[in-house]
Image (cartoon, helix red, strand yellow):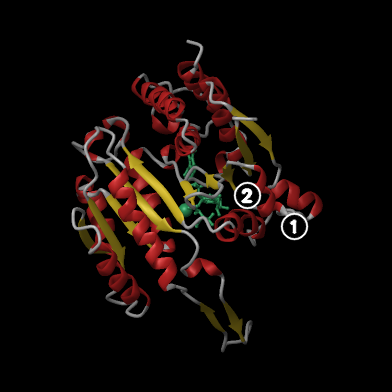
Amino acid sequence: MNHKKRIAIIPGDGIGREVIPEAVKVISASGAPVEISHFDWSAERYLADGVTIPPDGFAMLERDFDAILVGAFGDPRIPSNIHAKEILLGMRFKMDLYANVRPVRLLDAALCPLKGVEPKDIDFVVIRENTEGVYVDVGGCFKQGTPDEIAVQEDINTRKGVERIIRYAFEYCERNQKQDGSPRKQVLMADKANVLTHAHGLWQRVFKEVSGEYPQITAQHMYVDALCLQMVRDPRQFDVIVTNNMFGDIVTDLAAALQGGLGMAASGNIHPGKTSMFEPVHGSAPPIAGRNIANPFGAILTAAMMLGHLGLVAEAARIEGAVLEAVRQKKTTQDIGGTLGTREAGEWVAGRASAYN
Ligand code: NAD
Ligand code: IPM
Ligand code: MN
């Protein structure tokens, strides 16, 4: 019997094609028992033969793999972004990966743009609903191209969808510790219930109900605009944040800035018990693509998150430790103050994370 974890690798576009090979290098160096298969689904492939994802693609991923590691999608030659929609949002929706887990951790004080903030001060996680909201692409245009044009984009919030993501956040809080070993204690829901009275009224009612089942966890609430203020003013106060698809997208770019930028942020698209997909928070960054300057650490930390999810906890910890050491020793790309290229930073971490040291 094969005990190796089967990983599908989809680098995608732009810097995804540079950072993912570094993540793969580090996984191999860590000695993690994995079997890796590459897929070329990307802008390049779409432009070549019109394929975004083959007809049986999602079923094949679910059937043949334990996890998926993805780079990024987005290419200026495809302004409709149709391939990103079909591949990336396709995986999230069609594989029902309902929890987008985005940890926010400061590895070194030097990386944070805020004054007087230490690594112990920033260690929270954003749990983003990943299968509903305005992302469902329900809507349409009427009288397009006329002065009377109307555009409608629906915001879908189901009782089932809202309940499962809020419950996931409470379960996450209960089961996960902070980096320093202390327990997580608080779940904060961010919404805009003062304006989106119907949609976020549902979130409010469900949050109240589910939080009642977890009396040991402090339940808090903030409107999303206030959350943005507080994240910059005092990020120490956050622990587990749960929010809808669109707000989760926006606040995790803001939160990435607290960690040293988009090059440092990791994420997982998870459905417990099913094949889940892991990707850095950043996009394909076309202006810096192909120049060996993109920061590979977000992708490498994402790979560690994936290994941890697969139960390869020692390998994940070794990789995280190696990235931490690289940051401390400034063996990094320029965006976070180092002088190394993408490949050189990846090599350094791979050497440090090596199981054969
Ligand atoms: P982006 O994340 O690609 O870039 C935003 C900024 O962060 C840019 O200044 C970029 O240079 C910088 N940056 C991002 N990753 C970096 C890294 N690893 N190292 C150093 N700097 C980094 O976002 P964008 O510019 O808004 O979008 C570009 C394309 O990517 C668009 O097509 C967008 O739709 C797509 N996108 C895809 C994903 C994804 O596939 N998960 C996520 C976000 C954006
Ligand atoms: C992200 C990205 C995606 C999103 C885009 C590329 C569809 O910004 O993963 O954060 O909006 O979810
Ligand atoms: Mn985003």
> Counting residues from the N terminus, which is met first, the one under dot 2 or under dot 1?
1
Q: Amino acid at mark 1?
A: Pro
Above or below for 323 versus 62: above
Find residue 342 and report its horizontal and vertical position in percent. 53, 28
Image quadrant assignment for residue 175? top left
**Does residue 192 show up?**
no
Above or below for 176 versus 254: above
Label 1: how many residues lie within 10 Å, few (<14), some (14-19) or many (20+)?
Answer: few
Above or below for 294 versus 240: above
Label 2 close to label 1 by CB (< 8 Å): no
Find residue 345 and report its horizontal and vertical position in percent. 49, 23
Q: Residue at x 24, y 49 (%)?
A: 238
Q: Is mark 2 within 8 Å of ligand 1?
A: no
Q: Which residue is mark 1?
A: 55
Q: Which residue is mark 2?
A: 62
Q: Is residue 103 left or right of residue 136?
A: left
C-alpha separation, residue under disc 2 versus residue under disc 1: 13 Å
Image quadrant assignment for residue 164? bottom left
**Does residue 245 show up?**
yes
Label 2 element class: helix
Residue nearer the viewer, 298 or 286: 298
In which quadrant will I find the N terminus?
top right
Q: Residue at x 32, y 31 (%)?
A: 107
Label 1 element class: loop
Q: Is residue 286 left or right of residue 163?
A: right
Q: Is residue 14 left or right of residue 135?
A: right
Residue nearer the viewer, 312 or 129: 312
Q: Which mark is residue 31?
A: none
